């Protein structure tokens, strides 16, 4: 904490496992009432940071507010299992970042001024997250005692120069492809990041988020009554975010016994034939194709040249053959075998759907990039069936991704 404060990074990370071992009651209360407990944690962190960093320079007498970030290795909650009973509860989610908005400012303390009598209301707290603040309808000053007419309704306006603001970002999170049930469409969820969590992730990253499952008011759409006061849109207010190691995929790091078994198999002289026979064993023959798929799954070695350029280590495989030669079945096996894989058909895929598209953010009216199939499969395999049915313009768009491994 002292090192972070000296560097001007006023945050501290708390592991929930350490908190549970120190005080199970406190950990349980945090999980049930995170909105009430987190301000207490941050005030305690500010007091401790104020003690351990003294003496400070004369122009830094007051310690800035501290941010407490949470970290957890608990079992994540599936995005489609987020129900009403988890609202205002602490949850852990995993998924793929689809899009990230630009950094904007949100007021944490407001200063209001009356247009009529110029009375000021200062340091009004604003709830964290996407909750707004309802301005008072009436002025609080006593107009009769001052001998002037009564202030009209809705007299207050916000004074931006006297407000305290923090940075925030909105992230669109999608379920990981391997977590989507067969035949279902992936679910999406909006995530709110603030302060030191901003600009830490990019589209295509696999992340683990600890946050509060929250609700916010939903604007009415059309002439129906679906946007009434009781209807709320859900989002997650992140209290901690961590990048997942995409190299380990969903299988995680191998154990010591598995690593010993891998070394024993690698020492066998017929390891290539063994691996080839393990690829789609229900399909007889096609040994050369299966060996090529093995090279694709294992990949090569990325090399850095003396001039700073990189030579890609990923291998591309193109399967050509007559109908009925199990090309699609081999693709399906690769999708199930690879830790990270996305399967798509070339007949209905566009260049934007495969690489990335630029869309307009409805909240900020700015443009953000939303990743396609190749972004979602970062660190894994993209299986494109019916490659010959793709339009020529769309096929050219993926050449850069295949050659340079960039989009």
Image: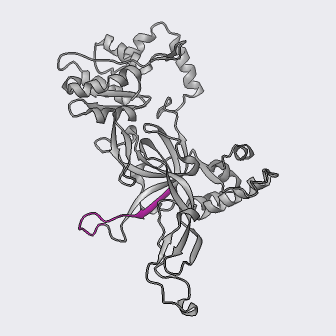
Residue at horizontal 57 percent and vertical 51 percent from the top: 195
Say whether residue 192 is magenta: no
Task: Say if 217 sits above or below 323 in the image.
Answer: below
Give residue 7's position: percent from left, percent from top.
70, 43
Depth order, front residue of 211/292: 211
Give the image quarter of residue 144: bottom right
Give residue 241's position: percent from left, percent from top.
54, 45
Task: Say if 400 sits above or below 356 in the image.
Answer: above
Most prominent secondary structure in the magenta stretch? loop
Residue at the front extreme? 148
| Residue 385 visible to the viewer | no
Q: Which residues are magenta?
A: 212-226
Horizontal side, residue 161 vs residue 79: left or right: right
Horizontal side, residue 167 vs residue 229: left or right: right
Residue at horizontal 44 percent and vertical 62 percent from the top: 215
Say whether residue 218 is magenta: yes
Residue at horizontal 47 percent and vertical 65 percent from the top: 132
Depth order, front residue of 286/103: 103
Q: How is the image coloured?
A: one colour
**What quarter of the picture does the C terminus occupy?**
top left
Residue at the left extreme? 323
Give residue 166's position: percent from left, percent from top.
56, 55
Give residue 267's position: percent from left, percent from top.
53, 10
Horizontal side, residue 347 vs residue 190: left or right: left
Give the image quarter of residue 119: bottom right
| Residue 379 visible to the viewer | yes
């Amino acid at each position: 904490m002292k090192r972070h404060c000296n560097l001007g990074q006023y945050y501290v990370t708390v592991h929930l496992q350490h908190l549970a071992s120190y005080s199970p009651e406190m950990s349980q209360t945090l999980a049930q009432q995170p909105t009430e407990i987190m301000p207490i944690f941050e005030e305690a962190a500010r007091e401790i940071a104020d003690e351990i960093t003294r003496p400070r320079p004369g122009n830094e007498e007051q310690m800035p507010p501290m941010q407490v970030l949470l970290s957890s290795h608990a079992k994540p909650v599936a995005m489609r299992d987020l129900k009403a009973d988890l609202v205002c509860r602490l949850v852990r989610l995993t998924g793929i970042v689809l899009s990230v908005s630009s950094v904007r400012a949100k007021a944490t303390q407001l200063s209001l001024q009356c247009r009529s009598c110029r009375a000021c209301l200062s340091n009004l707290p604003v709830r964290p997250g996407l909750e707004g603040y309802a301005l008072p309808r009436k002025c609080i000053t006593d107009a009769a005692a001052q001998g002037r007419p009564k202030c009209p309704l809705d007299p207050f306006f916000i004074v931006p120069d006297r407000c305290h603001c923090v940075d925030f970002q909105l992230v669109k999170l999608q379920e990981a492809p391997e977590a989507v049930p067969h035949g279902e469409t992936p679910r999406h969820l909006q995530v709110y990041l603030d302060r030191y969590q901003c600009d830490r992730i990019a589209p295509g990253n696999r992340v683990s988020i600890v946050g509060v499952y929250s609700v916010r008011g939903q604007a009415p759409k059309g002439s129906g009554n679906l946007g009434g006061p009781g209807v709320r849109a859900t989002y997650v207010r992140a209290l901690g975010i961590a990048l997942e190691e995409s190299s380990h995929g969903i299988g995680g790091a191998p154990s010591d016994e598995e690593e010993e078994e891998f070394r024993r198999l690698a020492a066998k002289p017929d390891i290539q034939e063994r691996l080839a026979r393990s690829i789609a064993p229900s399909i007889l023959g096609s040994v050369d194709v299966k060996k090529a798929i093995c090279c694709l799954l294992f990949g090569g070695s990325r090399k850095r040249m003396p001039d700073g350029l990189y030579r890609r280590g990923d291998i591309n495989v193109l399967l050509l053959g007559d109908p009925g030669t199990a090309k699609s079945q081999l693709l399906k096996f690769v999708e199930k075998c690879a830790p990270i894989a996305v399967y798509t058909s070339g007949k209905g895929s566009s260049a934007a759907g495969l690489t990335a598209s630029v869309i307009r953010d409805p909240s900020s009216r700015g443009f953000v990039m939303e990743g396609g199939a190749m972004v979602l499969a970062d660190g894994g395999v993209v299986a494109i069936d019916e490659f010959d049915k793709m339009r020529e313009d769309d096929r050219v768009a993926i050449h850069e991704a295949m050659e340079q491994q960039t989009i």
